[in-house]
Amino acid sequence: MSAFLGPIHYWLYNKITLQESLTADIINYANQAGWSGDFEQYRNDDNRDLGEIIDEGNIHGWLQTRILDAEGRYAHLLADILQENADRIQELKHVAYDFGTKNLIQSEANPTDIYQRFEDILLNGMPCDRINQVTEQSPESISWEQVQDIHAQSFADAGLTTESYYTLRYELMRGMTKATKYKVHSSGINRYQIAL
């Protein structure tokens, strides 16, 4: 393992590999459903340890490239699926929800714990992008705002808006919180709350 790799790099790499796992689940579902398309081109099953594959001379650049690659393939996969039939989003919502349940948050978690787990799972660019900002916090709830749509360019390149992205992300978050007493609420694509 490189002496230059720290916990934050593994934390970010884990988020990338989880994004790849969601992509794989959607590909598997599309193939099983018999939808037409070359969905396998969007799969990346390379889950080697970060220390084996990263460019140690350009750690930040390598991670940024992997994020853009993962998001780009995900966006193009959704475009291929939804441009043939936009109603498929309803089925994909179930896939995203089920993926969330595979990353279940413990039942005793409080709103702050849940928010942190979202931060540990959901890919929002590089940590320095500081996409999410907490706007309100109490023992019973936490609210946050996404200050920029970091995913928009990948989806624009695929010919989509980010509406499908945030629809599926919301279902994923709902799945993750299934075992808790809290619910995720969304008012638009950039404002969220975890509360009873």
Image (spheres, rainbow, N blue to C red):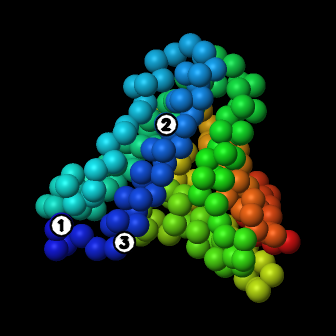
Measure how far apart labels 3 and 1 are at the Cα level: 14 Å
Note whether 19 is above or below 148 in the view shown. above
Q: Which mark is residue 65?
A: none
Occupied quadrant, residue 36: top right
For this orientation, the residue located farthest to the left is 57
Note whether 37 is above or below 133 in the view shown. above
Structural crowding at the residue carrying mark 3, measured as other residues with C-alpha within 10 Å and reported as few (<14), some (14–19) or many (≥20): few
Q: Residue at x 80, y 69 (%)?
A: 182
Q: Which mark is residue 1?
A: 1
Task: Report the residue marked by disc 3.
Answer: 8
Residue 123 placement, left or right of 144: left
Image quadrant holding the C terminus, namely bottom right
Circle count: 3
Q: Residue at x 42, y 53 (%)?
A: 16
Q: Residue at x 49, y 37 (%)?
A: 24
21 or 88: nearer the viewer: 21
Q: Amino acid at mark 3?
A: Ile
Q: Are marks 2 and 3 in contact (CB under 8 Å)?
A: no
**Callout 2: SS:** helix
Q: Amino acid at mark 2?
A: Ala
6 or 52: nearer the viewer: 52
**Callout 3: SS:** helix
Occupied quadrant, residue 46: top left
Q: Residue at x 36, y 71 (%)?
A: 8
Measure how far apart labels 2 and 1 are at the Cα level: 27 Å
Q: Are marks 3 and 1 in contact (CB under 8 Å)?
A: no
Please say whether residue 191 is visible from this viewpoint: no
Measure how far apart labels 2 and 3 are at the Cα level: 24 Å
Task: Report the residue marked by disc 2.
Answer: 24
